[in-house]
Amino acid sequence: MSSAPPTPSAPPARRLPLAGVLRLAKPSEIWFKPALSVVAAIAPPAFTLLALGRLDLVMYAMAGSLCALYAHSRPYAARARVLVRVVLGMLGGLGVALVAASLTGSAVVLVTVGALLAAAQKVLCDATRVGPPGNVVLTFVSSASLFAPQTLAQVPGHLALAAATGAWAWLVCMAPALVRPHGPERRATAAALKAAAGYADTGGTGEGHDRARAAGYTAVQAAWQSLLSTSAPSRTRRALERLVVRAEVALAAPAQAEAGRLRAWAGSLRGTGPVPETGLPHAAADELLGVAAARPLWSRLGPLTPLAARTALGCALAGYASLALGIGRPYWALVTAASLYQANIALTWSRAVQRVVGNVVGVLVFLAVVPLAHLGPAALVLCCLAFSFGAEVLISRNYWLGSVCVTPMALLITEFAGCQEAGTLMRERVVDTVVGALVGFAAAVAVTNRRAGDRVERALAAADRAREHTARLLAEPDPAPTALEFARRGLAVALSELRATADAAAGEWWQRALPQERVVLAEQSGHRTLAATARRQGLLPERDPATETEDARP
Protein backbone atom coordinates (compact mmCIF):
# COMPACT_ATOMS: atom_id res chain seq x y z
CA MET A 1 0.00 0.00 0.00
CA SER A 2 1.23 3.48 -0.72
CA SER A 3 3.29 4.92 2.10
CA ALA A 4 2.34 8.51 1.31
CA PRO A 5 0.74 10.07 4.39
CA PRO A 6 -2.82 11.40 4.17
CA THR A 7 -2.49 14.94 2.93
CA PRO A 8 -5.65 17.01 3.21
CA SER A 9 -6.39 19.18 0.26
CA ALA A 10 -8.16 22.46 0.30
CA PRO A 11 -11.90 22.21 0.89
CA PRO A 12 -13.95 21.97 -2.28
CA ALA A 13 -14.97 25.25 -3.85
CA ARG A 14 -18.43 26.35 -2.84
CA ARG A 15 -19.07 28.49 -5.90
CA LEU A 16 -21.69 27.22 -8.29
CA PRO A 17 -20.46 27.06 -11.88
CA LEU A 18 -22.11 28.98 -14.69
CA ALA A 19 -19.43 28.99 -17.36
CA GLY A 20 -19.93 26.11 -19.75
CA VAL A 21 -23.27 24.95 -18.33
CA LEU A 22 -25.06 25.76 -21.59
CA ARG A 23 -22.14 24.96 -23.89
CA LEU A 24 -22.97 22.59 -26.73
CA ALA A 25 -21.07 19.34 -27.11
CA LYS A 26 -20.63 17.12 -30.14
CA PRO A 27 -23.72 15.06 -30.94
CA SER A 28 -23.76 11.42 -29.96
CA GLU A 29 -22.53 9.10 -32.68
CA ILE A 30 -25.76 7.13 -32.45
CA TRP A 31 -28.16 10.07 -31.98
CA PHE A 32 -30.31 8.81 -34.84
CA LYS A 33 -30.96 5.43 -33.22
CA PRO A 34 -33.08 6.55 -30.24
CA ALA A 35 -34.58 9.34 -32.37
CA LEU A 36 -35.81 7.00 -35.10
CA SER A 37 -36.72 4.25 -32.63
CA VAL A 38 -38.99 6.42 -30.52
CA VAL A 39 -40.79 7.72 -33.62
CA ALA A 40 -41.23 4.17 -34.92
CA ALA A 41 -42.51 3.07 -31.49
CA ILE A 42 -44.96 5.95 -31.04
CA ALA A 43 -46.35 6.43 -34.55
CA PRO A 44 -48.26 3.14 -35.19
CA PRO A 45 -50.10 3.09 -31.82
CA ALA A 46 -50.85 6.82 -32.00
CA PHE A 47 -52.27 6.71 -35.51
CA THR A 48 -54.23 3.55 -34.67
CA LEU A 49 -55.86 5.33 -31.73
CA LEU A 50 -56.45 8.35 -33.97
CA ALA A 51 -58.30 6.15 -36.45
CA LEU A 52 -60.36 4.70 -33.60
CA GLY A 53 -61.18 8.14 -32.26
CA ARG A 54 -59.51 7.43 -28.90
CA LEU A 55 -56.72 9.97 -28.69
CA ASP A 56 -57.49 10.21 -24.97
CA LEU A 57 -55.62 6.89 -24.62
CA VAL A 58 -52.44 8.10 -26.32
CA MET A 59 -50.84 8.91 -22.96
CA TYR A 60 -51.00 5.25 -21.91
CA ALA A 61 -49.77 4.09 -25.31
CA MET A 62 -46.82 6.48 -25.11
CA ALA A 63 -45.90 5.05 -21.71
CA GLY A 64 -44.85 1.83 -23.41
CA SER A 65 -43.56 3.45 -26.58
CA LEU A 66 -41.09 5.64 -24.67
CA CYS A 67 -39.26 2.49 -23.54
CA ALA A 68 -37.74 2.56 -27.04
CA LEU A 69 -35.38 5.28 -25.76
CA TYR A 70 -33.39 2.81 -23.68
CA ALA A 71 -30.44 0.45 -24.12
CA HIS A 72 -29.24 1.52 -27.58
CA SER A 73 -25.60 1.16 -26.55
CA ARG A 74 -26.09 -2.41 -25.29
CA PRO A 75 -25.30 -5.56 -27.29
CA TYR A 76 -28.49 -7.15 -28.51
CA ALA A 77 -28.49 -10.09 -26.10
CA ALA A 78 -28.11 -7.71 -23.17
CA ARG A 79 -30.47 -5.16 -24.76
CA ALA A 80 -33.25 -7.73 -24.88
CA ARG A 81 -32.95 -8.33 -21.13
CA VAL A 82 -32.61 -4.66 -20.22
CA LEU A 83 -35.63 -3.62 -22.28
CA VAL A 84 -37.77 -6.28 -20.64
CA ARG A 85 -36.79 -4.88 -17.24
CA VAL A 86 -37.48 -1.32 -18.39
CA VAL A 87 -40.93 -2.25 -19.67
CA LEU A 88 -41.73 -4.13 -16.45
CA GLY A 89 -40.45 -1.20 -14.39
CA MET A 90 -42.56 1.20 -16.40
CA LEU A 91 -45.64 -1.00 -15.94
CA GLY A 92 -44.98 -1.28 -12.20
CA GLY A 93 -44.74 2.49 -11.73
CA LEU A 94 -47.71 3.09 -14.00
CA GLY A 95 -49.78 0.49 -12.15
CA VAL A 96 -49.06 2.02 -8.74
CA ALA A 97 -49.89 5.49 -10.08
CA LEU A 98 -53.16 4.44 -11.71
CA VAL A 99 -54.35 2.53 -8.65
CA ALA A 100 -53.49 5.47 -6.39
CA ALA A 101 -55.30 7.87 -8.72
CA SER A 102 -58.40 5.65 -8.68
CA LEU A 103 -58.44 5.30 -4.88
CA THR A 104 -57.94 8.89 -3.76
CA GLY A 105 -58.46 12.41 -5.00
CA SER A 106 -56.16 13.96 -2.41
CA ALA A 107 -53.48 15.87 -4.29
CA VAL A 108 -51.18 15.77 -1.25
CA VAL A 109 -51.36 11.97 -1.11
CA LEU A 110 -50.79 11.70 -4.85
CA VAL A 111 -47.73 13.97 -4.71
CA THR A 112 -46.35 11.87 -1.84
CA VAL A 113 -46.84 8.67 -3.85
CA GLY A 114 -45.19 10.32 -6.85
CA ALA A 115 -42.18 11.41 -4.79
CA LEU A 116 -41.66 7.92 -3.38
CA LEU A 117 -41.97 6.40 -6.84
CA ALA A 118 -39.47 8.94 -8.20
CA ALA A 119 -36.94 8.06 -5.48
CA ALA A 120 -37.31 4.32 -6.14
CA GLN A 121 -36.97 4.82 -9.89
CA LYS A 122 -33.89 7.02 -9.46
CA VAL A 123 -32.10 4.55 -7.20
CA LEU A 124 -32.90 1.48 -9.30
CA CYS A 125 -31.93 3.15 -12.58
CA ASP A 126 -28.63 4.40 -11.13
CA ALA A 127 -27.83 1.11 -9.43
CA THR A 128 -28.50 -0.92 -12.57
CA ARG A 129 -26.95 1.76 -14.81
CA VAL A 130 -30.01 1.94 -17.01
CA GLY A 131 -29.68 4.99 -19.10
CA PRO A 132 -29.75 7.36 -20.70
CA PRO A 133 -32.48 8.57 -20.23
CA GLY A 134 -32.45 6.95 -16.79
CA ASN A 135 -35.29 7.56 -14.39
CA VAL A 136 -36.70 10.75 -15.90
CA VAL A 137 -38.95 9.10 -18.49
CA LEU A 138 -40.28 6.56 -15.96
CA THR A 139 -40.97 9.33 -13.46
CA PHE A 140 -42.72 11.42 -16.11
CA VAL A 141 -45.01 8.50 -16.99
CA SER A 142 -45.93 7.59 -13.40
CA SER A 143 -46.27 11.18 -12.16
CA ALA A 144 -48.50 12.29 -15.03
CA SER A 145 -50.68 9.21 -14.54
CA LEU A 146 -51.26 10.10 -10.89
CA PHE A 147 -53.31 13.11 -11.94
CA ALA A 148 -55.24 11.49 -14.78
CA PRO A 149 -58.92 10.80 -13.96
CA GLN A 150 -59.11 7.08 -13.28
CA THR A 151 -61.32 4.30 -11.95
CA LEU A 152 -60.22 0.86 -10.80
CA ALA A 153 -62.16 -0.75 -13.64
CA GLN A 154 -60.12 1.20 -16.20
CA VAL A 155 -56.69 0.28 -14.78
CA PRO A 156 -56.33 -3.19 -16.39
CA GLY A 157 -57.16 -1.86 -19.85
CA HIS A 158 -54.75 1.05 -19.58
CA LEU A 159 -51.99 -1.24 -18.33
CA ALA A 160 -52.67 -3.69 -21.16
CA LEU A 161 -52.33 -0.89 -23.71
CA ALA A 162 -49.02 0.22 -22.16
CA ALA A 163 -47.79 -3.40 -22.13
CA ALA A 164 -48.69 -3.86 -25.81
CA THR A 165 -46.85 -0.71 -26.86
CA GLY A 166 -43.94 -1.68 -24.63
CA ALA A 167 -43.71 -4.99 -26.50
CA TRP A 168 -43.79 -3.10 -29.79
CA ALA A 169 -40.99 -0.82 -28.53
CA TRP A 170 -38.96 -3.96 -27.68
CA LEU A 171 -39.35 -5.21 -31.25
CA VAL A 172 -38.36 -1.83 -32.69
CA CYS A 173 -35.17 -1.70 -30.62
CA MET A 174 -34.21 -5.29 -31.42
CA ALA A 175 -34.87 -5.06 -35.18
CA PRO A 176 -31.37 -3.73 -36.12
CA ALA A 177 -29.87 -7.02 -34.90
CA LEU A 178 -31.05 -8.57 -38.16
CA VAL A 179 -28.76 -6.25 -40.13
CA ARG A 180 -25.76 -5.64 -37.86
CA PRO A 181 -25.71 -8.20 -35.05
CA HIS A 182 -22.42 -6.96 -33.53
CA GLY A 183 -23.04 -3.25 -34.04
CA PRO A 184 -23.07 -2.13 -30.38
CA GLU A 185 -19.89 -4.03 -29.51
CA ARG A 186 -18.13 -2.62 -32.56
CA ARG A 187 -19.15 0.93 -31.62
CA ALA A 188 -18.01 0.49 -28.02
CA THR A 189 -14.65 -0.87 -29.18
CA ALA A 190 -14.25 1.97 -31.68
CA ALA A 191 -15.00 4.50 -28.93
CA ALA A 192 -12.30 2.93 -26.73
CA LEU A 193 -9.77 3.09 -29.55
CA LYS A 194 -10.58 6.73 -30.31
CA ALA A 195 -10.34 7.69 -26.63
CA ALA A 196 -6.99 5.91 -26.36
CA ALA A 197 -5.79 7.74 -29.46
CA GLY A 198 -6.82 11.04 -27.87
CA TYR A 199 -4.70 10.22 -24.83
CA ALA A 200 -1.82 9.08 -27.00
CA ASP A 201 -1.88 12.50 -28.69
CA THR A 202 -0.96 14.06 -25.34
CA GLY A 203 1.97 11.70 -24.86
CA GLY A 204 0.81 11.21 -21.29
CA THR A 205 2.13 14.61 -20.24
CA GLY A 206 0.53 17.23 -22.49
CA GLU A 207 -2.23 19.66 -21.68
CA GLY A 208 -5.43 17.95 -20.60
CA HIS A 209 -3.78 14.52 -20.33
CA ASP A 210 -5.53 13.74 -17.02
CA ARG A 211 -8.98 14.25 -18.53
CA ALA A 212 -8.00 12.35 -21.66
CA ARG A 213 -6.69 9.41 -19.61
CA ALA A 214 -9.85 9.30 -17.47
CA ALA A 215 -12.02 9.41 -20.60
CA GLY A 216 -9.92 6.65 -22.13
CA TYR A 217 -10.26 4.28 -19.19
CA THR A 218 -13.99 5.00 -18.98
CA ALA A 219 -14.38 4.10 -22.65
CA VAL A 220 -12.29 0.95 -22.23
CA GLN A 221 -14.35 -0.20 -19.25
CA ALA A 222 -17.54 0.44 -21.25
CA ALA A 223 -16.14 -1.64 -24.10
CA TRP A 224 -15.29 -4.54 -21.77
CA GLN A 225 -18.74 -4.40 -20.21
CA SER A 226 -20.26 -4.48 -23.68
CA LEU A 227 -18.17 -7.46 -24.77
CA LEU A 228 -18.66 -9.38 -21.53
CA SER A 229 -22.44 -8.96 -21.69
CA THR A 230 -22.70 -10.70 -25.05
CA SER A 231 -23.54 -14.35 -25.55
CA ALA A 232 -21.02 -17.12 -26.22
CA PRO A 233 -17.64 -15.96 -27.56
CA SER A 234 -17.41 -15.70 -31.34
CA ARG A 235 -14.64 -14.94 -33.78
CA THR A 236 -15.83 -11.32 -34.03
CA ARG A 237 -15.92 -10.91 -30.29
CA ARG A 238 -12.43 -12.32 -29.84
CA ALA A 239 -11.09 -9.92 -32.48
CA LEU A 240 -12.82 -7.00 -30.74
CA GLU A 241 -11.32 -8.06 -27.41
CA ARG A 242 -7.85 -7.85 -28.92
CA LEU A 243 -8.57 -4.32 -30.09
CA VAL A 244 -9.72 -3.31 -26.60
CA VAL A 245 -6.47 -4.72 -25.21
CA ARG A 246 -4.62 -2.53 -27.71
CA ALA A 247 -6.54 0.48 -26.39
CA GLU A 248 -5.61 -0.48 -22.83
CA VAL A 249 -1.98 -0.81 -23.78
CA ALA A 250 -2.04 2.63 -25.39
CA LEU A 251 -3.43 4.08 -22.18
CA ALA A 252 -0.71 2.38 -20.15
CA ALA A 253 2.09 3.64 -22.41
CA PRO A 254 0.82 6.63 -24.45
CA ALA A 255 4.29 7.72 -25.53
CA GLN A 256 4.74 4.43 -27.40
CA ALA A 257 1.24 4.29 -28.88
CA GLU A 258 0.45 5.08 -32.52
CA ALA A 259 -2.60 7.34 -32.42
CA GLY A 260 -3.11 7.15 -36.18
CA ARG A 261 -3.16 3.37 -36.14
CA LEU A 262 -5.69 3.33 -33.28
CA ARG A 263 -7.97 5.68 -35.22
CA ALA A 264 -7.58 3.56 -38.34
CA TRP A 265 -8.68 0.49 -36.42
CA ALA A 266 -11.65 2.43 -35.04
CA GLY A 267 -12.67 3.55 -38.52
CA SER A 268 -12.51 -0.01 -39.85
CA LEU A 269 -15.17 -1.08 -37.34
CA ARG A 270 -17.89 0.84 -39.15
CA GLY A 271 -20.31 -1.23 -41.14
CA THR A 272 -20.17 -5.01 -41.17
CA GLY A 273 -16.71 -5.61 -42.62
CA PRO A 274 -14.15 -7.91 -41.03
CA VAL A 275 -12.59 -6.84 -37.74
CA PRO A 276 -8.88 -6.09 -38.22
CA GLU A 277 -6.33 -8.40 -36.66
CA THR A 278 -3.98 -6.68 -34.22
CA GLY A 279 -1.13 -9.17 -34.06
CA LEU A 280 -1.03 -9.66 -30.29
CA PRO A 281 1.58 -12.08 -28.95
CA HIS A 282 0.19 -15.60 -28.81
CA ALA A 283 0.32 -15.82 -25.00
CA ALA A 284 -1.57 -12.59 -24.58
CA ALA A 285 -4.12 -13.51 -27.23
CA ASP A 286 -4.92 -16.73 -25.40
CA GLU A 287 -5.65 -14.98 -22.09
CA LEU A 288 -8.21 -12.34 -23.06
CA LEU A 289 -10.49 -13.01 -20.16
CA GLY A 290 -11.54 -9.53 -19.09
CA VAL A 291 -12.78 -8.52 -15.67
CA ALA A 292 -16.42 -7.83 -14.95
CA ALA A 293 -16.56 -4.47 -13.19
CA ALA A 294 -20.18 -4.80 -12.12
CA ARG A 295 -20.83 -5.39 -8.43
CA PRO A 296 -23.90 -7.06 -6.89
CA LEU A 297 -26.98 -4.86 -6.97
CA TRP A 298 -27.32 -4.71 -3.20
CA SER A 299 -23.79 -3.35 -2.82
CA ARG A 300 -24.59 -0.49 -5.19
CA LEU A 301 -27.78 0.55 -3.40
CA GLY A 302 -26.11 1.65 -0.14
CA PRO A 303 -24.09 4.55 -1.57
CA LEU A 304 -27.24 5.82 -3.31
CA THR A 305 -29.11 6.42 -0.03
CA PRO A 306 -28.40 10.19 0.05
CA LEU A 307 -29.53 10.45 -3.57
CA ALA A 308 -32.76 8.60 -2.76
CA ALA A 309 -33.42 10.91 0.18
CA ARG A 310 -32.76 13.98 -1.96
CA THR A 311 -35.10 12.76 -4.67
CA ALA A 312 -37.95 11.84 -2.32
CA LEU A 313 -37.71 15.05 -0.29
CA GLY A 314 -37.14 17.35 -3.26
CA CYS A 315 -39.96 15.89 -5.37
CA ALA A 316 -42.42 15.93 -2.46
CA LEU A 317 -41.64 19.53 -1.47
CA ALA A 318 -41.73 20.68 -5.10
CA GLY A 319 -45.17 19.11 -5.56
CA TYR A 320 -46.47 20.57 -2.30
CA ALA A 321 -45.16 24.03 -3.25
CA SER A 322 -46.93 23.78 -6.61
CA LEU A 323 -50.16 22.84 -4.86
CA ALA A 324 -49.77 25.78 -2.47
CA LEU A 325 -49.47 28.11 -5.45
CA GLY A 326 -52.69 26.72 -6.92
CA ILE A 327 -51.10 25.12 -9.99
CA GLY A 328 -53.27 22.41 -11.50
CA ARG A 329 -50.43 20.12 -12.52
CA PRO A 330 -48.05 19.62 -9.58
CA TYR A 331 -46.48 16.64 -11.34
CA TRP A 332 -44.61 19.08 -13.59
CA ALA A 333 -42.80 20.48 -10.55
CA LEU A 334 -42.26 16.95 -9.26
CA VAL A 335 -40.72 15.75 -12.52
CA THR A 336 -38.54 18.86 -12.73
CA ALA A 337 -37.11 18.11 -9.29
CA ALA A 338 -36.60 14.44 -10.17
CA SER A 339 -34.66 15.36 -13.30
CA LEU A 340 -32.11 17.45 -11.40
CA TYR A 341 -30.37 14.92 -9.19
CA GLN A 342 -26.95 13.93 -10.45
CA ALA A 343 -23.86 12.43 -8.82
CA ASN A 344 -23.09 15.56 -6.78
CA ILE A 345 -24.22 19.08 -5.96
CA ALA A 346 -22.19 20.76 -8.69
CA LEU A 347 -23.70 18.57 -11.42
CA THR A 348 -27.18 18.97 -9.90
CA TRP A 349 -26.82 22.75 -10.08
CA SER A 350 -25.78 22.54 -13.73
CA ARG A 351 -28.79 20.37 -14.54
CA ALA A 352 -31.10 22.83 -12.74
CA VAL A 353 -29.86 25.71 -14.89
CA GLN A 354 -30.17 23.64 -18.04
CA ARG A 355 -33.69 22.52 -17.13
CA VAL A 356 -34.98 26.03 -16.48
CA VAL A 357 -33.43 27.51 -19.62
CA GLY A 358 -34.61 24.66 -21.83
CA ASN A 359 -38.15 24.71 -20.48
CA VAL A 360 -38.55 28.47 -20.82
CA VAL A 361 -37.35 28.38 -24.43
CA GLY A 362 -39.51 25.31 -25.02
CA VAL A 363 -42.60 27.15 -23.80
CA LEU A 364 -41.95 29.83 -26.43
CA VAL A 365 -41.61 27.11 -29.07
CA PHE A 366 -44.95 25.68 -27.93
CA LEU A 367 -46.55 29.11 -28.42
CA ALA A 368 -45.28 29.15 -32.00
CA VAL A 369 -46.59 25.68 -32.91
CA VAL A 370 -49.97 25.79 -31.14
CA PRO A 371 -51.81 27.12 -34.22
CA LEU A 372 -50.40 24.26 -36.28
CA ALA A 373 -51.20 21.61 -33.67
CA HIS A 374 -54.79 22.87 -33.40
CA LEU A 375 -55.46 22.27 -37.09
CA GLY A 376 -56.71 18.80 -36.20
CA PRO A 377 -55.96 15.57 -34.34
CA ALA A 378 -53.58 14.32 -37.04
CA ALA A 379 -51.59 17.56 -36.84
CA LEU A 380 -51.38 17.16 -33.07
CA VAL A 381 -49.95 13.64 -33.42
CA LEU A 382 -47.48 14.74 -36.08
CA CYS A 383 -46.25 17.62 -33.90
CA CYS A 384 -45.66 15.23 -31.00
CA LEU A 385 -43.70 12.89 -33.27
CA ALA A 386 -41.60 15.76 -34.59
CA PHE A 387 -40.74 16.96 -31.09
CA SER A 388 -39.94 13.45 -29.85
CA PHE A 389 -37.52 13.07 -32.75
CA GLY A 390 -36.01 16.51 -32.17
CA ALA A 391 -35.52 15.88 -28.47
CA GLU A 392 -33.35 12.82 -29.10
CA VAL A 393 -31.42 14.58 -31.86
CA LEU A 394 -30.54 17.53 -29.63
CA ILE A 395 -30.29 16.20 -26.08
CA SER A 396 -26.82 14.71 -26.55
CA ARG A 397 -25.55 18.20 -27.46
CA ASN A 398 -26.75 19.57 -24.12
CA TYR A 399 -29.65 18.75 -21.82
CA TRP A 400 -31.16 22.23 -22.15
CA LEU A 401 -31.29 21.95 -25.94
CA GLY A 402 -33.17 18.66 -25.75
CA SER A 403 -35.57 20.22 -23.24
CA VAL A 404 -36.50 22.79 -25.87
CA CYS A 405 -38.26 19.94 -27.70
CA VAL A 406 -39.35 17.91 -24.66
CA THR A 407 -41.30 20.83 -23.19
CA PRO A 408 -43.66 21.49 -26.13
CA MET A 409 -44.13 17.72 -26.54
CA ALA A 410 -45.20 17.41 -22.88
CA LEU A 411 -47.58 20.36 -23.30
CA LEU A 412 -49.10 18.89 -26.44
CA ILE A 413 -49.63 15.51 -24.77
CA THR A 414 -52.02 17.20 -22.31
CA GLU A 415 -54.19 18.18 -25.30
CA PHE A 416 -54.91 14.62 -26.41
CA ALA A 417 -57.80 14.65 -23.93
CA GLY A 418 -59.05 17.98 -25.36
CA CYS A 419 -57.76 21.39 -26.41
CA GLN A 420 -56.75 23.68 -23.56
CA GLU A 421 -56.01 27.37 -23.23
CA ALA A 422 -52.42 27.88 -24.34
CA GLY A 423 -51.70 30.80 -22.04
CA THR A 424 -52.69 28.83 -18.94
CA LEU A 425 -50.58 25.85 -19.97
CA MET A 426 -47.55 28.04 -20.60
CA ARG A 427 -47.86 29.93 -17.32
CA GLU A 428 -48.27 26.76 -15.27
CA ARG A 429 -45.34 25.09 -17.00
CA VAL A 430 -42.97 28.01 -16.34
CA VAL A 431 -44.06 28.38 -12.70
CA ASP A 432 -43.79 24.63 -12.04
CA THR A 433 -40.37 24.50 -13.68
CA VAL A 434 -38.99 27.33 -11.55
CA VAL A 435 -40.58 25.95 -8.38
CA GLY A 436 -39.35 22.44 -9.07
CA ALA A 437 -35.81 23.62 -9.82
CA LEU A 438 -35.53 25.90 -6.76
CA VAL A 439 -37.09 23.51 -4.27
CA GLY A 440 -35.37 20.47 -5.75
CA PHE A 441 -31.95 22.08 -5.57
CA ALA A 442 -32.59 23.30 -2.02
CA ALA A 443 -33.37 19.70 -1.02
CA ALA A 444 -30.11 18.55 -2.62
CA VAL A 445 -28.17 21.07 -0.53
CA ALA A 446 -30.06 20.18 2.64
CA VAL A 447 -29.53 16.41 2.36
CA THR A 448 -25.79 16.08 2.76
CA ASN A 449 -23.66 13.27 1.41
CA ARG A 450 -20.86 13.07 3.95
CA ARG A 451 -20.03 9.51 2.95
CA ALA A 452 -18.53 10.69 -0.35
CA GLY A 453 -15.15 11.03 1.38
CA ASP A 454 -15.43 7.52 2.81
CA ARG A 455 -15.99 6.14 -0.68
CA VAL A 456 -12.83 7.88 -1.89
CA GLU A 457 -10.88 6.23 0.94
CA ARG A 458 -12.29 2.83 0.01
CA ALA A 459 -11.50 3.37 -3.66
CA LEU A 460 -7.95 4.38 -2.70
CA ALA A 461 -7.53 1.23 -0.65
CA ALA A 462 -8.89 -0.93 -3.49
CA ALA A 463 -6.52 0.68 -5.99
CA ASP A 464 -3.55 0.17 -3.66
CA ARG A 465 -4.45 -3.49 -3.11
CA ALA A 466 -4.80 -4.08 -6.85
CA ARG A 467 -1.45 -2.38 -7.54
CA GLU A 468 0.34 -4.35 -4.82
CA HIS A 469 -1.11 -7.64 -6.08
CA THR A 470 0.00 -6.86 -9.62
CA ALA A 471 3.46 -5.81 -8.44
CA ARG A 472 3.87 -9.10 -6.53
CA LEU A 473 3.05 -11.05 -9.68
CA LEU A 474 5.56 -8.99 -11.66
CA ALA A 475 8.24 -9.86 -9.08
CA GLU A 476 7.71 -13.58 -9.68
CA PRO A 477 10.10 -15.22 -12.17
CA ASP A 478 7.33 -16.89 -14.18
CA PRO A 479 3.82 -15.64 -13.28
CA ALA A 480 0.86 -17.47 -14.78
CA PRO A 481 -0.40 -15.59 -17.87
CA THR A 482 -4.01 -15.88 -16.71
CA ALA A 483 -3.19 -14.44 -13.26
CA LEU A 484 -1.23 -11.59 -14.83
CA GLU A 485 -4.08 -10.73 -17.21
CA PHE A 486 -6.63 -10.73 -14.40
CA ALA A 487 -4.33 -8.58 -12.26
CA ARG A 488 -3.83 -6.03 -15.04
CA ARG A 489 -7.53 -5.81 -15.78
CA GLY A 490 -8.37 -5.58 -12.08
CA LEU A 491 -5.91 -2.74 -11.59
CA ALA A 492 -7.31 -0.87 -14.60
CA VAL A 493 -10.84 -1.21 -13.21
CA ALA A 494 -9.73 -0.04 -9.74
CA LEU A 495 -8.00 3.03 -11.15
CA SER A 496 -11.02 3.88 -13.29
CA GLU A 497 -13.35 3.61 -10.29
CA LEU A 498 -10.97 5.68 -8.17
CA ARG A 499 -11.03 8.54 -10.66
CA ALA A 500 -14.84 8.40 -11.01
CA THR A 501 -15.29 8.33 -7.23
CA ALA A 502 -12.87 11.23 -6.69
CA ASP A 503 -14.55 13.34 -9.38
CA ALA A 504 -18.00 12.69 -7.91
CA ALA A 505 -16.84 13.56 -4.39
CA ALA A 506 -15.09 16.73 -5.55
CA GLY A 507 -18.45 18.25 -6.54
CA GLU A 508 -20.13 17.45 -3.22
CA TRP A 509 -20.68 19.96 -0.41
CA TRP A 510 -20.44 19.82 3.38
CA GLN A 511 -17.73 17.21 3.65
CA ARG A 512 -14.19 16.96 4.96
CA ALA A 513 -11.27 17.80 2.71
CA LEU A 514 -10.50 15.10 0.16
CA PRO A 515 -7.08 13.37 -0.08
CA GLN A 516 -6.42 14.69 -3.56
CA GLU A 517 -2.65 14.24 -3.37
CA ARG A 518 -3.02 10.61 -2.34
CA VAL A 519 -5.39 10.05 -5.25
CA VAL A 520 -2.86 11.51 -7.69
CA LEU A 521 -0.02 9.41 -6.24
CA ALA A 522 -2.13 6.25 -6.40
CA GLU A 523 -3.01 6.95 -10.02
CA GLN A 524 0.60 7.64 -10.99
CA SER A 525 1.97 4.48 -9.35
CA GLY A 526 -0.94 2.40 -10.66
CA HIS A 527 -0.43 3.51 -14.25
CA ARG A 528 3.31 2.82 -14.01
CA THR A 529 2.47 -0.69 -12.83
CA LEU A 530 0.03 -1.13 -15.71
CA ALA A 531 2.77 -0.20 -18.16
CA ALA A 532 5.20 -2.65 -16.55
CA THR A 533 2.56 -5.39 -16.69
CA ALA A 534 1.87 -4.76 -20.36
CA ARG A 535 5.58 -5.10 -21.07
CA ARG A 536 5.78 -8.33 -19.10
CA GLN A 537 2.89 -9.71 -21.17
CA GLY A 538 4.73 -8.87 -24.37
CA LEU A 539 2.28 -6.12 -25.31
CA LEU A 540 4.99 -3.42 -25.25
CA PRO A 541 8.69 -3.37 -26.16
CA GLU A 542 10.92 -4.54 -23.34
CA ARG A 543 12.79 -2.00 -21.25
CA ASP A 544 15.74 -2.25 -18.91
CA PRO A 545 14.85 -4.56 -15.96
CA ALA A 546 15.84 -1.88 -13.45
CA THR A 547 13.47 0.56 -15.09
CA GLU A 548 10.68 -2.00 -15.14
CA THR A 549 11.16 -2.65 -11.42
CA GLU A 550 10.99 1.08 -10.81
CA ASP A 551 7.76 1.25 -12.85
CA ALA A 552 6.14 -1.30 -10.58
CA ARG A 553 6.93 0.62 -7.39
CA PRO A 554 4.74 3.44 -6.01
Image (cartoon, grey):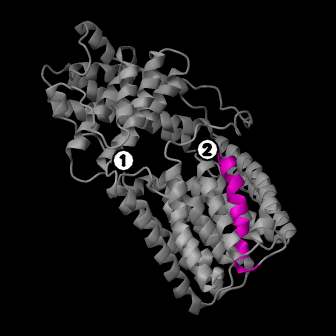
- Magenta span of residues: 398-418
In depth, the one of 500 and 331 nearer the eye is: 331
Callout 2–callout 1 Cβ contact below 8 Å = no
Say which amino acid is labelled 2.
Answer: Asn
User: Which disc, if any, is residue 344?
Assistant: 2
Give the crowd class for mark 2: few <14, some 14-19, many >=20 residues within 10 Å: many
In this view, the residue in front, 139 or 405, is: 405
- Residue 548 percent coordinates (x, y): 27, 13
**Secondary structure mostly taken by the magenta-highlighted segment of the chain:** helix
User: Judging from the image, what secondary structure is the residue with disc 2 in?
Assistant: loop
Going by the image, does 209 lie left or right of 348?
A: left
Whether residue 267 is visible:
yes
Residue 377 is drawn in which quadrant?
bottom right
Q: Residue at x 63, y 66 (%)?
A: 140
Left or right of 112: which side holds 269?
A: left
Residue 402 located within the stretch drawn in magenta: yes
Residue 237's quadrant in the figure? top left
Across and down, in percent, residue 179 comes to 34, 54
> What is the distance, in whole Å, between disc 2 and disc 1 at their CAs?
33 Å
SS state under label 1: helix
Which residue matches tag 1?
Answer: 183
Q: Position of residue 480 (x, y in %)?
A: 14, 30
* Neighbours of disc 1 within 10 Å: few (<14), some (14-19), many (20+): many
Percent position of residue 307, x then y:
58, 54
Instruction: Tell me the amino acid under the disc marked 1.
Output: Gly
Give me the residue at 27% from left, 39% from top: 290
Q: Earlier in the sequence, mark 2 or mark 1?
A: 1
Left or right: 471 as drawn, with respect to 408? left
Magenta highlight on residue 286: no
